[in-house]
Amino acid sequence: MTRKPTLLDVADLAGVSTATVSNVINDTKYVGDEVKRKIHEAIETLNYIPNNLAKSLRVKESKLIGLMISDISNPFFPPVVRGIEDVLARNGFNVLLCDTDTDPVKERNYLKVLLGRRIDGLIVSLAGAEYSHFQDLDIPVVFFNRIPETGSYNTVQTANVEGAFLATTHLLSHDYKRIAIVAGPQHLSVGRERLVGYREALEKSGSAYDPDLVKVSPFNSDGGYSAMKELMEQDKKPDAVFTCNNVLTLGAFRFLRESGFKIPSQIALVGYDDPDWTTLVDPPLTVIRQQSFEMGLETGGLILDCLKKKESKGARKIVMSLELGIRKSCGCNVGQK
C-alpha cells in the first residue's frame, strides 16, 4: 500500500517547519501569502488530507453535524437536505447524512455511529414515535418535519394543521359532499396534525365526519394506492379526496388512472407537497406547497444558533408557512400554475 503523506512531507516540500504548515491549515497564526501559497501547492501536490479527527480532539470541535432523515426517496427530503447543507457549508461545517428508512432500530444504531464520530450537533426527522434515545445528549439537537410530541426540543416544521384545513376547505368550496382523506401514520406528528386540520375544516363548515372516508396509510406509494382502492370500492364513493403527502398522492393518482376514474369529474384530488410530476400529469394537481428548501435553511440556521449559544434558554419552535397551489384536479377551471 502507498504510504499516506504526512504533515512532515508537506513541510519538507514547501521548505517550512511543521508548525508553519499547522498554522496555515488551522488558521491559528499569521503566515505570509507567499509561504501560504507554497504550503497549499505542497498539499495539492501530495494530496495531503489533514487529520480532522485529531484536530477535533484538540479543539473539542469536529465541524461535523449529524443529519438523520426517514426516507431519502421521498421527494420532500432532498431540497430540505440541500438547504441544511448550504447553510452549514457556508459556516465551515460538514454533514453526515443517514437514512433511517423509517426504522427506529436503524435510527438508534445511526445515533451511536454519529456520536462515535464526535459530531458537534444533530438534526433529525424522526423514524417513529419514540424519541427517548435523544434525551440527555450533550450536543444540540434540532428536529424537523417529524418532531417529538413534547415541546422541550428545538423544532422546525410546516403548519400542518393549517395546510390540511386549507386543502379541505378548498374542496368544500366546490360543494363536494363526501370528502375523503388518505392520512399518514398517526404515531407521527405530520400524520396526526394533517388529520386534525381535515376534521377542523369539516367541523367549521358543518359537515359530518365520516370514518368510512378516512384511510390511514404508511407514507409510501403503495399505501396511497391501497387506500384509494379501498375508498373507491365502497358503495358510497367519495367525490373528492385529500392525500396527505406526495408519495401517498402518487399512489392514489396511479390507482385512479389505472382504474379509469376521471379527475376531477368523478373524483377531485388535492395533494400535499409539490414535486415536479404534479405539473406534468393530466390534469395537473392542486396541492399544498411546502417551503422545503427554506425549511432546510431554517433548520441549518437553528442548529448553528444552538452551537453558538452553548447554554440553552428554552426550546425554539419555527413553523413554516405554506400555500395552496390551484390547478385543475380539484375542479377549478384554471390554467396550470
Image: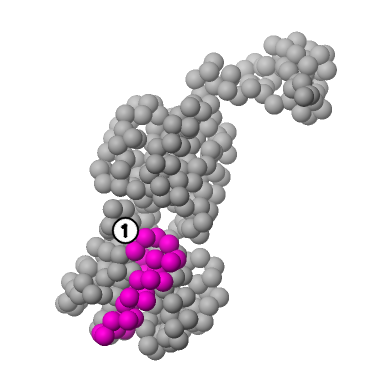
Residue 276 image-quadrant placement: bottom right
Question: Mark 1 falls on what kind of element?
Answer: loop
Residue 50 image-quadrant placement: top right
Q: Is residue 237 magenta?
A: yes
Q: Is residue 278 magenta?
A: no
Badge 1 amino acid: Pro
- Give the answer, above or below, for where 312 lies relative to 84: above
Query: Residue 243, image x and y in percent?
Result: 37, 69
Report the front residue among 192 and 218: 218
> Is 162 left, or right, of 63 in this rendering?
left
* Residue located 53% across and 26% down the image: 62
Q: Which residues are magenta?
A: 217-244
Query: Residue 153, image x and y in percent?
Result: 31, 39
* Residue located 43% across and 80% down the image: 256
**What residue occupies the far bottom of the structure in this picture?**
265
- Give the answer, above or below, for where 23 lies relative to 237: above
Specify few, some or many for label 1: CA neighbours under 10 Å numbering under 14, 14-19, or 20 or more: some
Q: Which residue in the structure is indicated by mark 1?
A: 185
Viewport quadrant of the N terminus: top right
* Residue located 44% across and 70% down the image: 251
- Give the answer, above or below, for where 150 lies relative to 223: above
